Image (cartoon, helix red, strand yellow):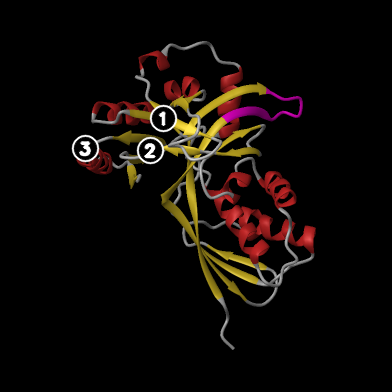
C-alpha cells in the first residue's frame, strides 16, 4: 500500500514596522507590527502519513522531535481535537534560525493548517485554531493567514491588510550572526537612548486594511524597527549589511524582528541583483523577490 505524501512550503516573514509598546505583567511585550510574507525564502515539509506518532527528520538539525515546533503543533492539535494521525515529516530547512524571519513558527503553522484541513480531522474554527497557534509562539497565528497583516498584542491580534510594493524588488539579507530575542527585549528595556537610527534615511510604503488598495483609504507606513536601537550597535555585521544595501541602491531597508536579517527594497531590478551578488560574495546570504 502506497503511503500518502503531501509536500508543503512554509514561507518566511519580515517585519516592515515594529514598535514595542510596553512590557506586560506576564513578562511578554505588547507590539504594534506589520508582517509581510516573503515567499522567496521558505522551508519545505514533506508529510507522509504512516505508522503512529509524529517523527521529524531534518538533515541540518539534530534536534529531538519533541523539541520541534512542528511536533508541538501536531501534539497540541491532537490534544484539542482527538485527531492524532501517524506522520513522518522530512523538513528541508532554508529559513535560517535566529534571523527574525519566523521559520519555526511558519513550520508549526503549516502543520496546523495540514491537520485542520485533513479529511479525517474534525477541524477547529478559526478563533480556536488561532488561540492554539498563539500558545505555540507569538508569530504562529500570522502564518495561518495568506497575506500581510498588522499585529498587536504579542502578535496574535491580527488585521489583514494590503501593502503596495508594486514595481519593487525585495532583497532579504541574512548575516551569519544570531541575535537572542530574550536578550534583545531586555536590552531594549534597559537601553540608553541612541542616535544611530537618526542617520538612516526613511522610506514609506502604502497600506490599507479596508478593501482594495487602489480604491480604499490608505495609510503611509515608514520602515521602522525599535530593536535596531540596541541590536545595530551590538552587532556591527547587521549594521554594515543595512548600510551596504542603502549605499548600493536600496530605497529603504529595515531589520526584521529582533534580527539578524535585513529586508530592503529596490526600484531598479539590476541594482538589486548586483547588491545581492555583492553580499553573497562576502559570505552574506541574500534572496530576491520581485513584487508585482
Is residue 147 left or right of 88 when viewed as pictured?
left
Say which residue appears at 27% left-offset and 41% top-offset. Answer: 276
Instruction: Find residue 264 and report its image quarter.
Output: top left
Residue furthest front in the image = 215
Is residue 68 left or right of 161 when viewed as pictured?
right
Q: Are marks 2 and 1 in contact (CB under 8 Å)?
A: yes
Q: Please give the residue where the numbered disc 1 appears in the rendered image.
A: 205
Q: Please give the residue where the numbered disc 2 appears in the rendered image.
A: 165
**Magenta stretch containing residue 80, yes or no?**
no
Rate crowding at label 1 as few (under 14), some (14 to 19) or many (20 or more) other CA atoms within 10 Å.
Answer: some
User: What's drawn in magenta, residue-wise?
Assistant: 23-32
**In the structure shown, which secondary structural element does the residue marked by tag 1 occupy?**
strand
In the rendered structure, find residue 286 and report the number of the disc placed on it: none
Instruction: Find residue 267 and report its image quarter.
Output: top left
Say which residue appears at 42% left-offset and 17% top-offset. Answer: 197
Mark positioned earlier in the residue sequence (1 or 3): 1
**In the structure shown, which secondary structural element does the residue marked by tag 2 occupy?**
loop
Task: Give the CA distance from mark 2 to mark 1.
Answer: 7 Å
Say which residue appears at 33% left-offset and 44% top-offset. Answer: 286
Q: Please give the residue where the numbered disc 3 appears in the rendered image.
A: 271
Rate crowding at label 2 as few (under 14), some (14 to 19) or many (20 or more) other CA atoms within 10 Å.
Answer: some
**Residue 67 horizontal/vertical position (percent):** 64, 53
Amino acid at each position: 500500500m502506497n503511503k500518502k505524501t503531501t509536500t508543503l512550503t512554509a514561507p518566511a516573514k519580515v517585519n516592515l514596522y515594529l514598535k514595542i509598546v510596553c512590557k506586560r505583567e506576564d513578562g511578554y511585550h505588547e507590539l504594534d507590527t506589520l508582517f509581510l510574507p516573503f515567499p522567496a525564502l521558505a522551508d519545505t515539509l514533506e508529510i507522509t502519513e504512516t505508522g503512529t506518532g509524529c517523527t521529524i527528520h531534518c538533515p541540518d538539525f539534530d534536534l529531538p522531535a519533541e523539541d520541534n515546533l512542528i511536533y508541538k503543533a501536531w501534539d497540541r492539535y491532537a490534544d484539542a481535537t482527538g485527531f492524532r494521525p501517524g506522520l513522518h515529516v522530512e523538513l528541508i530547512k532554508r529559513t535560517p534560525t535566529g534571523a527574525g524571519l519566523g521559520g519555526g513558527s511558519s513550520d508549526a503553522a503549516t502543520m496546523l493548517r495540514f491537520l485542520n484541513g485533513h479529511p479525517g480531522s474534525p477541524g477547529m474554527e478559526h478563533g480556536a485554531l488561532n488561540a492554539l497557534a498563539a500558545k505555540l509562539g507569538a508569530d504562529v497565528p500570522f502564518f495561518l493567514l495568506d497575506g500581510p497583516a498588522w499585529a498587536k498584542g504579542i502578535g496574535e491580534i491580527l488585521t489583514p491588510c494590503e501593502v503596495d510594493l508594486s514595481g519593487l524588488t525585495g532583497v532579504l539579507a541574512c548575516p551569519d550572526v544570531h541575535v537572542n530575542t530574550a536578550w534583545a527585549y531586555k536590552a531594549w528595556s534597559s537601553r540608553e537612548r541612541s542616535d544611530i537610527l537618526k542617520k538612516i534615511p526613511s522610506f514609506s510604503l502604502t497600506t490599507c486594511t479596508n478593501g482594495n488598495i487602489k480604491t480604499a483609504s490608505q495609510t503611509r507606513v515608514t520602515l521602522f524597527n525599535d530593536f535596531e536601537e540596541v541590536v545595530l550597535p551590538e552587532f556591527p555585521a547587521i549594521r554594515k549589511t543595512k548600510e551596504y544595501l542603502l549605499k548600493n541602491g536600496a530605497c529603504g531597508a529595515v531589520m526584521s524582528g529582533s534580527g539578524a536579517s535585513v529586508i530592503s527594497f529596490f526600484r531598479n531590478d539590476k541594482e538589486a541583483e548586483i547588491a545581492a551578488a555583492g553580499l553573497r560574495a562576502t559570505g552574506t546570504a541574500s534572496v530576491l523577490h520581485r513584487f508585482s
